[in-house]
Image: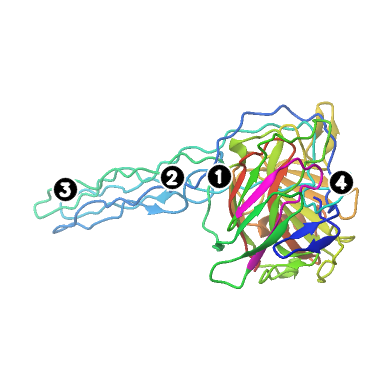
Amino acid sequence: MRIDRSIAWTTVFVLFAGPLVGCSVRGVGGGGAGGATGSGGTSASGGTSATAGNSSTGGATSSGGWIASGGTTGGSGMGSGGNAASGGTGTGGATSSGGSTDSGGTAGGGGYDSGGSTGSGGATIAGGSSGTGGGTASGGNSGTGGLAATGGSSGSGGTTAGGGTTATGGTTASGGTTASVDCTDTSTTQHSFTKQYENGSIAVTGSTKTYYTMTNWWHKFSGQTVKLDGLSMTVGNSQGASVPASDGNPMGFPTIFIGSYQGHTTVDSNLPKQVSAIQSVPTIFSTNASSLDTSNMNATYDVWFTSSGNVLGLTSSNPGKGGAYLMVWLYKPSARQPRGGTGQATGVVPNYPGKTVTGMPGTWDVWVDSSTDPPCISYVSSTPLDELAFDLNNFIKDAVTQKYGITSSMYLSLVFAGFEVWSGGDGVQTKQFCATVN
């Protein structure tokens, strides 16, 4: 990922005048063939509770089902969609089951690499990586909620009454679903950016907490725009700006972040925080990315770890020696790839494919580049996702346990989320972003 080197303040925003260099990118490689684009991702409710039946003498009213989190995630479920509840029994009445269990869940992925050749001027947080990579899979599945439950209350003499009505479940979920996490920040701050390097603060409604945003077109700028509506960000590329397939660097990395970077410090981020002291990092990153492009664009987290608890300096463009990058990719673009991997006859493949991560659904391809200091570790969802609602600490703890390059003595300093765009991206949107460090 790339971050800028110098800044100049204006009354509304800051213009960045030097590239931010972080986790550097790979050139185009020969990864596996791309799959089909997965469908998008909105949260879908697992199902509505249906009353099992009316209670009368001898019978008890039973609930139709218990609703956890919404729709399904691109092939992997996390929370239960609806637990079966007993219908209700009475004298002479028959017990019937309520709602059937439905899978809800969230899924995770994303992240981004940075690095590569330094572009002239401006702030950068996007690094990106390239290479012909694995394909994408389909997005979400339709989740059905509670099924018809015949509760059956019974009156004297044992006449069974008809139970609940059929409850429709979640609508088809694309990408992933938003699980219940303790991260509910909202904002009404508005920004409309049309320059290569613009940025500004985002105030959280009803709180002293703030976020920060940067346009960050560090590698190529040809009129791309970024619009902020609270913690929702929309990218414009109506003119079709792009870099060729041979160029491993994305055009930029428009992003929202918490932490302190080059003199921009967000309020109440609780950062830096030593890894050993982290209890949880609930976060939400909801996008429409996979519905637009799964070949030359990505939706990603970029998380920075430093060797000390000191805030990064005004000119710091990476976590520094003794630190590390952790990327979480919602999906791998078929024409691009993270940094690291191992060379095979068919191209570069992940160092650790198909890994499970405690507390996370599905499997994750792990790419590790330890050839530089700081090292770069990328977790890439095996199934394309449009959104994540999860505990980021699950990945942090896994990277420490697996000794990929992050240690418990390091300090979590920055959490970025945004889009690496090599081409396209017109209308790609962060529908919701939220991050809290406990």
* Of pointers 3 and 1, the one earlier in the residue sequence: 3
Residue 362 appears anywhere in the view: yes
Circle 2 residue:
102
* Res 183 → quadrant: bottom right
The three-letter code of the residue at mark 1 reads: Gly
Q: Nearer the viewer, mark 3 or mark 1?
A: 1
- Dot 2 or dot 1: first in sequence order is 2
Packing grade of label 1 (10 A; few <14, some 14-19, many >=20) is: many
Residue 33 position (above or below residue 53): above
Judging from the image, what secondary structure is the residue with disc 2 in? loop
Callout 3 touching callout 1 (CB < 8 Å): no
Q: CA distance from mark 4 to mark 1?
A: 34 Å
Mark found first going from the N terminus, 4 or 3: 4
N-terminal-most mark, 3 or 2 = 2
Identify which amino acid the numbered label 3 is placed on.
Ala
Amino acid carrying mark 4 in the image? Gly
Badge 3 element? loop
Q: Pointer 4: what residue?
A: 119
Find residue 15 and report its image quarter: bottom right
For badge 2, the amino acid type reads Asp
Query: Label 1, on which residue?
Result: 176
- Asked if residue 352 is positioned above or below residue 7 in the image, the reply reads above
Counting from the top left corner in percent of width and height, residue 93 is at 18, 50
Within-10-Å neighbours for mark 4: few <14, some 14–19, many 20+ = many
